[in-house]
Amino acid sequence: MMTTQTCDKGTADMGTAKAKMAQELSEAPLAIFRQEQVLSEPLADLARRLQKHTPNVVVTCARGSSGHAAAFAKHLIERYLGIPVSPAAPSIASIYGGGLHLKDQLVLSISQSGRSDDLLAITESAKRSGALTVAVTNAEDSPLANMSDVVLPICAGPELSVAATKTFIATVGALARLTARWAGNAVLEEAIERLPERLGAAAGLDWSAAVPVLAEADSLVTIGRGSTLAIAREAALKLKETCNLHAEAFSGAEFMHGPVSLVETRYPILMFTPNDAAAPGMRQLAADLRRMGTALFVAEPGGASPARLPVLPPDQPETDAICLIQSFYAMAVQLAERLDIDVDRPRHLSKVTSTL
């Protein structure tokens, strides 16, 4: 296992009356900042290995918010390296006792706790088959970290709220760093350096215009594309976890293939517009949805409007997308408060989920 510098775990203030989720999302910039030093050496070593022996495919293993981070990695790696990325079905190893032929391929196992049994099973199977296994985790002493060839700590420190916020942001930040270093993409690396400050600013943006409408909804849709598809999926999960609202995520392209039939005035849509070549298509979709009469809220640059959620000035598409979820998290705390839900105690959930 490749050794790394240990992240400073920091301390959590247990005496504050502020929601832990709100406190922890405010700590996300520090996690990204810590990564600069901690991940520098292991990422350089890993990038050299990958550049010398380039895999034909990257396989990801993840669940929940980590699964959405894996979807973000899929976009990053396919866009900037041209290597196909596919999620593994952990049950192939954990339930059916099988394995995948992954000799000389890259396997990214992404887990906050590094303790989910099914992810451990598929990672162990992949390693036996000859894959290069990389653990992206917040727990450097976990079983996942101990069995993997390389460990990339996300440096998020303790997260006490059940709903992951800073760990998601720290994970996608680490995966963006991996992609930038592997691809030799200086533009992305420089944007990541600016990310801590921009995350702080993103948390302060006012998305409260959406709160009254979402609070009255029984069900809603989130939409993204390209760099923001994983963000839309993470937002939908957080609406379920923290606000007890049914939300379903779609790509802007997928939504027109059937789900558009759901559109009506009482079915809100939250759209995350990317800051790249996918933006014009998303803006056209937004115009079509408005003509259909939906309650549409769009996170995008532009003038003040009740239906437009403010975003930071454009910088770099993938880091801009990360800032969008930070703004959303802050709004989700407000929405939970309006619904009189304890955002730190989601129904039926625990911090570490064990699945077979």
Image (cartoon, rainbow, N blue to C red):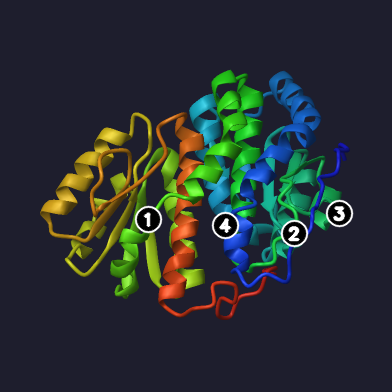
Is residue 4 rendered to the left or right of residue 30?
Answer: right
Residue type at tag 3? Asp
Residue type at tag 1? Trp
Residue tagged 1: 207
The quadrant in which residue 266 appears is bottom left
Residue tagged 4: 65
- Quadrant (top left/top right/bottom left/bottom right) for the C terminus: bottom right
Residue tagged 3: 141
Q: Residue at x 51, y 70 (%)?
A: 241
Label 3 vs label 1, nearer the camera: 1
Residue 155 location (% of width, % of height): 74, 46
- Distance (Cα) linking label 1 and label 2: 27 Å
Labels 1 & 4 near each other (Cβ < 8 A): no
Residue 149 location (% of width, % of height): 82, 40
- Distance (Cα) linking label 3 and label 2: 14 Å
Relative height, residue 206 to residue 83 (above, below): below
Q: Residue at x 62, y 19 (%)?
A: 184
Whichever of callouts 3 and 1 sits on the residue coming sooner in the sequence is 3
Residue tagged 2: 158
Q: Residue at x 53, y 38 (%)?
A: 198
Residue type at tag 4? Ser
Label 1 vs label 2, nearer the camera: 1
Numbered disc 3: secondary structure: loop
Residue 210 showing in the rendered view: yes
- Distance (Cα) linking label 3 and label 4: 21 Å
Q: Residue at x 73, y 64 (%)?
A: 13
Residue nearer the viewer, 201 or 3? 201
